[in-house]
Image: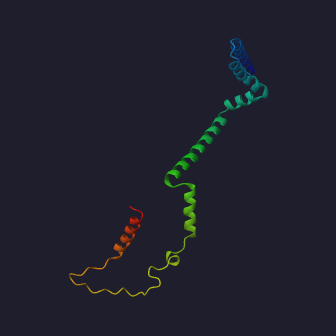
């Protein structure tokens, strides 16, 4: 009964302020004030005020809100830790799929000397002191890179 009286008084005061605002030719603000002023009466008429007051004065309800807040806090903490320690969900799924589809490395890749004889390469005799030494494999790799760079004008 007290809640209904207070809500009616608040609505009446708000409508009075809206009327004064409309008298001052501020119709948009007056309309907005009238809308806000009618909310408490509407809540009383729908019975929502009684429901809210029942919730507000029950300790069990507040304990329930506390438990929900704790659950939300734990959930968000685990999400934050998960994001900090690993990549995105997409990256984790890709890693799991790669682990699941992985095959033994020896079975999936050809041997380094496949198609060649397994005997060690013959060692060439040492060249004479004045002769040029043959290029090494690494030098050949760099010569290919140099050729590509020259081709592009770099």
Q: Residue at x 71, y 11 (%)?
A: 23
Q: Going by the picture, which residue comes out furthest to the left?
A: 129
Report the label total: 0
Q: Residue at x 54, y 73 (%)?
A: 103
Task: Give coordinates of residue 78: x percent, y percent.
Answer: 55, 49
Q: Position of residue 81 (x, y in %)?
A: 51, 50
- Answer yes or no: is residue 34 visible: yes
Identify whether 135 is placed above or below 147: below
Q: Is residue 36 above or below residue 134?
A: above
x then y, percent, for residue 132: 26, 79
- In the image, 143 versus 57, the foreground residue is 143
Up-down relation of residue 26 to residue 104 (above or below): above
Is residue 57 something one can see in this rendering? no
Left or right of residue 121, residue 103 in this image = right
Say which of 146 and 52 sits in front: 146
Quadrant for residue 139, please give it: bottom left
Q: Pick the quarter of the image with the C terminus.
A: bottom left
User: What residue appears at the point 56 percent right and 63 percent down from the top-left corner?
Assistant: 96
Location of the N terminus by quadrant is top right
- Name the spot of residue 151 as percent of width and height, x first: 41, 66
- Give 21 or 38, whichever is nearer the viewer: 21
Asked which colour scheme the image uses, the reply is rainbow
Q: Residue at x 37, y 67 (%)?
A: 146
């Amino acid at each position: 009964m007290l809640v209904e009286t207070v809500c009616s008084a608040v609505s009446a005061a708000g409508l009075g302020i809206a009327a004064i605002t409309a008298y001052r030719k501020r119709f948009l603000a007056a309309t907005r004030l009238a809308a806000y002023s009618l909310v408490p009466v509407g809540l009383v008429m729908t019975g929502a005020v009684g429901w809210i007051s029942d919730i507000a004065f029950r300790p069990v309800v507040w304990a329930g809100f506390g438990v929900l807040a704790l659950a939300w806090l734990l959930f968000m903490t685990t999400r934050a830790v998960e994001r900090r320690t690993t990549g995105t969900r997409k990256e984790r799924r890709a890693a799991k799929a790669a682990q699941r589809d992985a095959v033994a490395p020896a079975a999936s890749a050809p041997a380094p000397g496949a198609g060649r004889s397994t005997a060690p390469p013959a060692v060439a005799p040492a060249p004479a002191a004045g002769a040029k030494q043959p290029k090494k494999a690494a030098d050949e790799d760099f010569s290919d890179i140099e050729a590509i760079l020259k081709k592009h004008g770099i």
